[in-house]
Image (tube, helix red, strand yellow):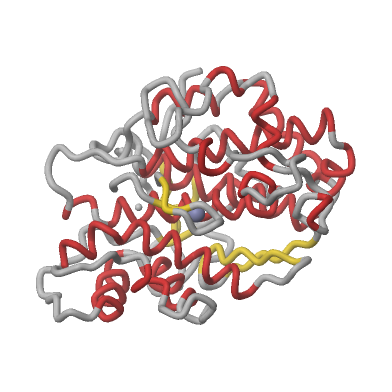
Amino acid sequence: MTVVWGMLRVSALLGVLLLIACGDDGRVAPSDVPTADMGPVPSADGGDTGEGDAFVPTSPLVDPACVDGMYSEVLPAVDADISDLTWAGDVGAYVDAFLDRRYPVGAALVRGGRTNTDYGQDCDVLYAGSPSSAGDVIDRMNTIVHECGHFYDGELSTFTDNTYVVTPTQQISCSRGDATDRGGDTFARSRINDDEYAALRPACPSGSSGPDCDFYADTYLDGDPDNGNFEGGDQGFNMLIEEAFQYVNSLATSWSVLDQSPPGRSTTARDGILTFLWYVERYLRMARLDFPGAYERLSGDACWRDAILTLWGRAWLYLEATTGMDGLSIHGDALETLVLDTDLLAEIERIRAAHGC
Ligand SMILES: [Zn+2]
């Protein structure tokens, strides 16, 4: 399938490194050219935060008349000057100053993440490593925003309800999204290891990566949901989509720091979200075919449909904005081919149809 990429700018008020990002259990594990059609178009309602131009995705992979195609967001100011920001040894101050200029959505997620005090340290400090320079912090910015996004969502979520802070002005809170044996209506995300798609990109051996294997599966689709022991892969759809939302933030952050990265260095910024879009499609297919209760929860519940379509729209907004950019992809082309499988795309269309689109 050939995809013609484009991006439309919409007028609106208001205003993505190395292989790092983490699993839900706290383990650290692996964690791009805008083209034509950049003319301004009217916007029904605005994007996220601050002042700036909001963009809607115009990829043929979104439906302009549905939630995904109507998603809009002010994209990162990737050219904003940060040359006057100096490193004074304060992680939080540097992160805030950098993200306020380059990626205000990420800045808000970090500030929100700091409201989660469950781990004894601010999320940004916790994931900054031991920086001794601004460059060290910039190298970790992707991980910081991704993990602080988890912290923020975790702070706002309850046992039964998951909250996803998409942007500072859009939160989605949905119920009963965990696996059935964990109090919800869905199934362990690791069960998609058993579908007919898994063999197309089998899990890489632990700790390794390669062009033909799934670098993320060992972290996110791990364990045996039937062995009675908790493993990250036991978590349901609620935490699958939580990861997906944060991998959009990883791409956005990596894009925001791209000009600060050493020439020639490539990261998995696009690989991560493409992998998770593939997982979400496969999960929906398995739910529809094998787990009717889960499918009823996800396709019959307007909140989960909204979450799925919002994720899809936001992901393609960033994927099209970063198409072909050097340094933001390692195996992205192969992953994109998997995501664009006709039968898997039909799962997203079914969600749109259920949503009345
Ligand atoms: Zn994560």
Q: Is residue 49 above or below residue 225?
A: below
Q: Is residue 212 above or below residue 38?
A: above
Q: Is residue 325 above or below residue 236?
A: above
Q: Is residue 88 above or below residue 225?
A: below
Quadrant of the rendered image containing residue 312? top right
- Residue drawn at x 76%, y 31% is 286
Q: Quadrant of the C terminus?
A: top right
In front here: 173 or 142? 142
Looking at the image, residue 317 sits to the left or right of residue 227; the answer is left
- In percent of width and height, residue 244 lies at 55, 48
- Number of disc labels: 0
In front here: 222 or 180? 222
- In percent of width and height, residue 210 lies at 36, 25
- Residue drawn at x 69%, y 46% is 234
Quadrant of the rendered image containing residue 288? top right
- Residue drawn at x 60%, y 23% is 198
- In percent of width and height, residue 335 lies at 46, 28
- In percent of width and height, residue 49 lies at 45, 72
Looking at the image, residue 97 sits to the left or right of residue 213; the answer is left
In front here: 96 or 42? 96
- Residue drawn at x 29%, y 48% is 17
Looking at the image, residue 184 sits to the left or right of residue 118; the answer is right
